[in-house]
Amino acid sequence: MNSGIDLQGTFVQSLSDFGISTELAKILWMPFPMLLMLIGATVGVLVNVWLERKISAAVQQRIGPEYAGPLGVLQPVADGLKLVFKEDILPSKADPFLFTMGPILVVMPVFLSYLIVPFGQNLVITNINTGIFLWIALSSIVPIGLLMAGYASNNKYSLIGGLRAAAQSISYEIPLALSVLAIVLMSNSLSTIDIVQQQSGYGILSWNIWRQPIGFVIFWISALAECERLPFDLPEAEEELVAGYQTEYSGMKFALFYVGSYVNLVLSALMVAILYLGGWSSPIPIELLGNLVDVDPTSSWLQVVDASLGIAMTVLKAYFLVFLAILTRWTVPRVRIDQLLNLGWKFLLPIALANLLITAALKLAFPTAFGG
Amino acid sequence: MQIAEGVQLVTFAILSILMLGAALGVVLFANIVYSAFLLGGVFISMAGIYILLNADFVSAAQILVYVGAVNVLILFAIMLVNKREEFKPLKNGWLRQGSTAVVCGGLFALLSAVSIVTPWSISTVSPLSSSVVPIAKHFFTDFLLPFELASILLLMSMVGAIILARRDFLPDDVGATSTQDSLTLPERPRELAGK
């Protein structure tokens, strides 16, 4: 299998040819993927908001946004601009420093987690060996930001919302991590690239979802709970808690929470796509198609097609899952806080443990099928 | 490797200042919530220093365990305890703080003297690309017993947590159930058929 296009290598090589030292060329390369990541995540949020508005409208038999741009695609931009220009209110008895730090701490780890999302063999910002573990570690910083926001607002709804959010995200992190662990056990690696590589052999048949159906369901439920999406949106719960920890926030600080939650949703969907749905690999392996029409697998145009197909596949899979999440949000009622914690601790945790145990046993019994 | 070394040095300086500042804040702030949040900052800076030492797995584990679990637990404990208490300033309170400062300063001087005097054996082997595999090899060979003991301890606490969560504790029946066998937990009798 060839490595596909390597943009960094090409960039560094061409700059070195101009007589710039390799190190400097590498430093000059650095801002591009970072900017690309930020822009990609933000555009992802805009698409997500538009989808949310359109799908919720379709569920409720409305039309939804329609006048801002064709099919209302500019509506999220208008929303964003409105939030930028709104007054930034600081409640008089709030703690100004913690009040500002809260949303920042919520947003930063989520954006940082995009570091490890691969869109192709070399289309990833860093291929670090602790990839998926880093994502779990980073997502565990978020509850601190939520607690900070809830405490600093000096409002009882906010405090309860913050406590609920933290309780929810720490209790669902354990089944999430256990289901990821089962995948890692099968791939023999924590790196996201290796995880996708391991399931790219036979197209759709080799995806992890067939080998880990229970893990897939556990992961998706836990990811929805981590994102505070509607069956599990207890921390916000407009009807009972006003809006939880977001109650006192307005303007750009509120926008940070808003953006953070949507970026987190897209990130979780991308993670499901990478861990269970084969990442950038297409349902029918591209090498097979290349062999059928008899093209040279190292030709440059094929590599470009391959890379674009990989990006398109990853994004398609992720947005299919986002669609499911939005549909769930607008059709399923909210659970109660005790039901939520019961589901996490009494149901998902034992099942995730059993799943891990069964995966380990199957790996020992059938090393060829379960990544020996 | 001029630029890389410079970046390393600057990062180390920033991380150390952050860590020392946050650690001093943990001790010196009167508001306990600030102390708890700053403790998270100390842990995160330590994770950064682990990354500088090429220990990527340890640094991620540091964030996951200390920031994500221990610090959140501390914050939870602080925020759930709703106790307002006025503390009267103690007479001769400065004596306590002064003696604490002297002891801490002495300890700091002792430890820094030890760390400067000790001839550390600095390895010149180029760092491994991944620390996960060597760590795992050590876990399953020469550190097998401590590793297994720790995992059994964690498993026990998790099973305990599940059992504690699964029983329906009835506060009203505490007196009535005390006549039961002392080894059984007071809990709601399970319905035999579904409701």
Image: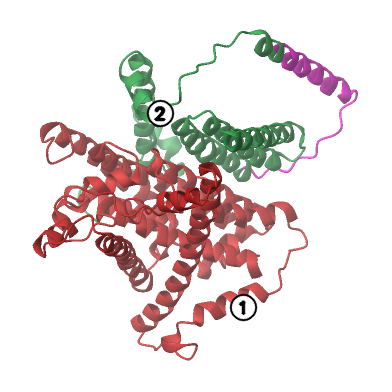
Chain colours: A red, B green
**Residues in magenta?**
B81-110
> Residue drawn 39% across and 56% down?
A268
The secondary element bearing badge 2 is classed as loop
Tell me if A81 is positioned left or right of B195 in this view.
right
In front: A269, or A89? A269
Q: Is residue A213 above or below residue B63?
A: below
x, y (%) of residue B32? 70, 39
Residues at discs 1 and 2 both on one chain:
no
Q: Return the mark for residue A335.
A: none
* Chain of the residue under the numbered disc 2 shown in the image: B
x, y (%) of residue A299? 24, 59
Q: Circle 1 is placed at which residue position?
A: A82
Q: Residue furthest bottom?
A: A67
Residue A95 in sight in this render: no
Residue type at mark 2 is: Ser
Residue A304 in sight in this render: yes
Q: CA distance from mark 1 to mark 2?
A: 47 Å
Q: Main secondary structure of the magenta part?
A: helix
Residue type at mark 1 is: Lys
> Residue drawn 59% across and 39% down?
B77
Task: Give the quarter of the image for residue B114.
Answer: top right
Tell me if B88 is positioned left or right of A94 in this view.
right
> Residue drawn 32% across and 41% down?
A178
x, y (%) of residue B100? 79, 19
The secondary element bearing badge 1 is classed as helix
Label 2 Cα neighbours within 10 Å, binned few <14 / some 14-19 / many ≥20: some
In front: B105, or A127? A127
Q: Circle 2 is placed at which residue position?
A: B131
Task: Give the quarter of the image for residue A203.
Answer: bottom left
